[in-house]
Image (cartoon, helix red, strand yellow):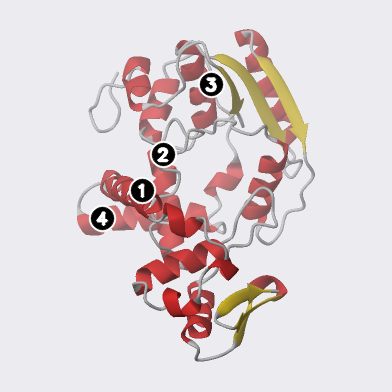
Amino acid sequence: MRNLTGVDVTSESLLRESTFPVSGSAVDLAVSGGPDSLAMLLLALEHGLQVTVHHVDHHVRPTSTDEARYVASVCESLGVAVVVHDVHLESGENFEARARRARRSVLPPGALTAHTMDDVVETMVLNTLRGAGRLGLSPMIGSPTKPLVGVRREALHAWLATTAFTPVHDETNDDIRYRRNHVRHELLPLMCEVAQRDVVPILYRQAVLLGEEEQWLNELTHEDQSLGLGDVDCRDLRTWPLARQRRWLRGVLAQDDDPLDTHPPTADEVERALAVVRGEVTACELSGGRRLSRTDQRLKLT
């Protein structure tokens, strides 16, 4: 069969674009029951992986428990082990972020998720709107837990339609009150209209290039990353190129008190920290109730 762009869509072509572990490997899959994750499950089995499915029931929508039962029934029909994780969330502000955090808290480390090329680009656009550097503009690139980032969502859905399985539909994915949905359903189509072409593969290629550059820069600055705040004399630090100073400060000032996530400082925080390094001020305030100060040309965080 062919998808809307006239390209053949088969499990073989999708697997060629995927980065699943080698056949025979044991993997955990995060499966919501939606088309992306359901297609990932079927492709993983076709690839010969030993699969354990993990489904997270957020108990927010009336249909969520039915979806958990559906995923369990699909797994039973496929002879696949399934674990249902119950988390309880209230609808409201920052729901997407809270739901993501809740999922990550119960899923096993290394669980594979069904993020596609389209998800990469949506995240890239969202990060651009917030302000981001290379890392934010190359999300998920090179991640071993994201085997489908080289696959278009449309192709997955087209192939899934040829199988005997019908995915569940999460109506919240249509609600443009959520910023990602707004980008997906309105902003990206408008960008395609303005460009008079499909911008997703273009932006994805940019993300890949930026991801490769980020990896290279990490290798170049490996020794910098091993230096703590008090290990560098500010007089020496001031001789570094400004980009190198910013990169090092983003690393040493990142908040890692959350075992599931690390939050880099904002651009404003980095600029305030640079003022301390340059000696323009002796201290500055940072997020999380932290204070960066300089004594005898050494930095200290309290």
Q: Is residue 38 above or below residue 78?
A: below
Disc 2 and disc 1: Cα gap in Å? Answer: 8 Å
Q: Is residue 67 visible?
A: no
In terms of secondary structure, where does tag 4 sit? helix
Which amino acid, by three-letter code, is at mark 4?
Answer: Glu
Disc 4 and disc 1: Cα gap in Å? Answer: 27 Å
Residue tagged 2: 142
Residue tagged 1: 211
Q: Quadrant of residue 158?
A: top left
- What label does residue 193 carry, if any? 4
Residue tagged 3: 41
Is disc 4 surrounded by few (<14), some (14 to 19) or many (20+) residues within 10 Å? few
Place of residue 162 in the rendered image (x, y in percent of width and height, measured from the top left): 41, 16
With 158 as the anchor, is 229 left or right in this view?
right
The C terminus sits in image quarter: bottom right
Disc 3 and disc 1: Cα gap in Å? Answer: 27 Å
Is disc 3 surrounded by few (<14), some (14 to 19) or many (20+) residues within 10 Å? many
In terms of secondary structure, where does tag 2 sit? loop
In terms of secondary structure, where does tag 3 sit? helix
Which amino acid, by three-letter code, is at mark 3?
Answer: Leu
Task: Return the disc, 2 or 1, that comes first in the chain's sequence.
Answer: 2
Which amino acid, by three-letter code, is at mark 2?
Answer: Gly
Discs 2/3, front: 2
Q: Quadrant of residue 27?
A: top right
Task: Return the disc, 4 or 3, that comes first in the chain's sequence.
Answer: 3
Task: Return the disc, 2 or 3, that comes first in the chain's sequence.
Answer: 3
Q: In the current view of this chain or complex, which residue is farthest to the bottom?
A: 280
Q: Are marks 3 and 1 in contact (CB under 8 Å)?
A: no
Which amino acid, by three-letter code, is at mark 1?
Answer: Gly
Q: Quadrant of residue 73?
A: top right
